[in-house]
Image: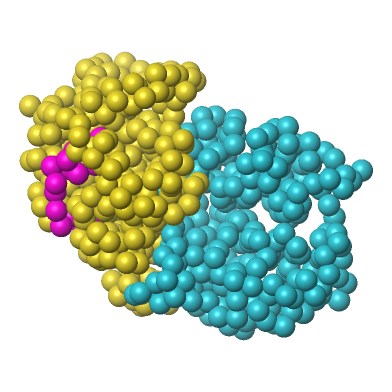
Chain colours: A yellow, B cyan
Amino acid sequence: MKLTSMKDAVSRYVPDGAVVAIEGFTAFICFSAAHEIIRQKKRDLTLCRMTPDLIYDQMVAAGCAQKLVFSYMGNPGVGSLHCIRRAVEKGIPQPLEIEEYSHFGMVGRYLAGAAKLPFYPLRSYYGADLAQANPRIKFIQDPYGSGQIAVVPALNPDVAIIHAQRADEQGNTQLWGLVGMQKEAAFSARHVIVVAEEIVGEDVIRSDPNRTLIPHMVVDAVVHQPKGAHPSYAQGYYDRDNQFYLAWDTVSREEQQVEAWLEEWVYGLEDWAAYLAKLEAQEPGIWERLAAGEAYSQPVNYGVYR
Amino acid sequence: MVMNDYTSSELMIAASARALQGERVVFVGVGMPNIACNLARRTVAPDLELVYESGVFGARPARLPLSIGDPTLVSGATSVCSMADLFMNYLQGGRIEAAFLGAAQIDRFGNLNSTVIGEYAHPKVRLPGSGGACEIAIHAKKVFLITPLSKRTFVEKLDFVTSPGHLDGRPDGRSRLGIPGGGPQLVVTNKANFVFDQESKEMVLSSLHPGVTFEEVQAEVSWPLKSVSALEETVPPTTEELRLMREELDPDGIYTGRK
């Protein structure tokens, strides 16, 4: 039985010191998993994500991370990630080692990791300084004679956490909208936790196999967590809470404010249900404000072949 | 007809949109580039396909996207793909004609820094880093830069090269390194626009915005500035461009500076 609670999934698959990838490019960012990791006071994690976003800003502020592997550290559409900047620039609350790539570099690392290749070749980093700043980015000679090509090493996280619209109890996961690096991150990882807005029957999955991004065989745990990506979003379920992203820009500027926020919204709460209840008490109309509306795709015919 | 009541952001957006005349595939960023690309699609480039690095081709955003991963980019798009597809097949595959970039520092050859101010290991200011910028700068056939003019931005020497422009100015510098894209072609600022000289690859002044003098521009640029021989005045936004920006593309004035 893979269906389990967030508490159990994190406790079992996110040990101290683990290499963790909670992916999702602006969309499907699994804050409910991050809050549980913070609440369980996990330490010395290596956090991998193309865009660390607020989720890793919070985890770094909470002291969970010793290293960050990334390609763009900004608050998307807003500005800086102040907690990560404090850690990098001033060592607060503790120094944070960084390993930096470009987006394509991170994409290539997951691709190589998923395919069990040692590295991934890409046409990038020419005339730029990143390969000097990060010695793990190297140039090799194309054996077929086209000249120098950049390579990045495979990334194989200990655990990937993937948020999606729906999955069945076995972990067959369907996702639509910005699929980002979700599939490659899942296949590259030793363990996978899927967090789904809805748990559906296997028949729903089998009715639309092209939409299945991640098959059950790579999934270790399935967590049913509606609205589990707030303040990020799940396409067709709820919108990004941009007000939160703007508010975090203010909160995150001061270390004490962040500590108070973590106390109020993470440590002081039992679980994500309590977080949602607190959110709804603070703003009763929140889900109307973040409603996705309806725009259904046209059904397709897979046919019956017997 | 031209209105004289407009913000410098509106002028920058209009100038950027016009640069997309005839283009078919543009890599879009958030903020001003997003409005410029949507404006271009309604004016000078009706066939323009908007590509976002989040994995969207042919976006038709129904509202102003607040990030490059906004769900409004997905609904109604031609195609949504993985980021592996986006970077491998669309960008590295040479399908992107034009792209917009910004940066904290730009040098005279259009090389860009969006990584650190100060030393990399001990930064004074840690900036977001490359994201897709390094690959966009390498693979897009043309790169357009939008940024406010400031001496802090237009520097003699970058603290870090995040994205290659015309490197050290040698005309074959990019091709010698195996860089397929054409590099920066245009810089749009709040005071003037710049192009890159065919021979020297140096950024040169091409048009001054109405009411701005050469000296005012030079004061915000760290190197001795040259001009094209036929220096022009930037054409201000037209009534129709302003109407589209104010009524349809950014009704709240978030990026057009009217808020």
| Pick the front one: A191 or A151 | A191
| Image vertical order of residue B208 relative to residue A174, above or below | below
Which span of residues is magenta-colored?
A32-47
The residue closer to the viewer here, A167 or A210, is A167
- Left or right for A19, reference B76: left
Q: Is residue B149 above or below residue B47?
A: below
Residue at image point 78% right, 71% down: B216
- Asked if the stretch drawn in magenta spans residue B4, the answer is no
Residue at image location 89% in from the left, 46% down from the top: B2
Query: What residue sits 41% from the left and 65% below the top?
Result: B126
Of the pair A65 and A306, the residue shown nearer to us: A65
The picture places residue B50, in percent across and down from the top left corner, at: 59, 44
Left or right of B230 in this view: A129: left
Q: Quadrant of residue A175?
A: top left
Task: Examine the rendered structure and indicate whether residue A184 appears above or below residue B119.
Answer: above
Q: Residue furthest right?
A: B1
Residue A211 location in percent, x, y? 34, 30
Does the magenta-highlighted stretch encompass residue A36? Answer: yes
Residue A186 placement, left or right of A40: right
Q: Is residue A117 left or right of residue B104?
A: left
Residue B206 position within the rendered picture, expressed as x and y whole percent measured from the top left: 79, 68
**Image quadrant for the N terminus of chain B?**
top right
Which residue is painted at 78% across and 36% down in the image?
A: B243
Quadrant location of the C terminus of chain B in the rendered image: top right
Q: Please indicate, yes or no, whether residue B173 appears anywhere in the rendered image.
A: no
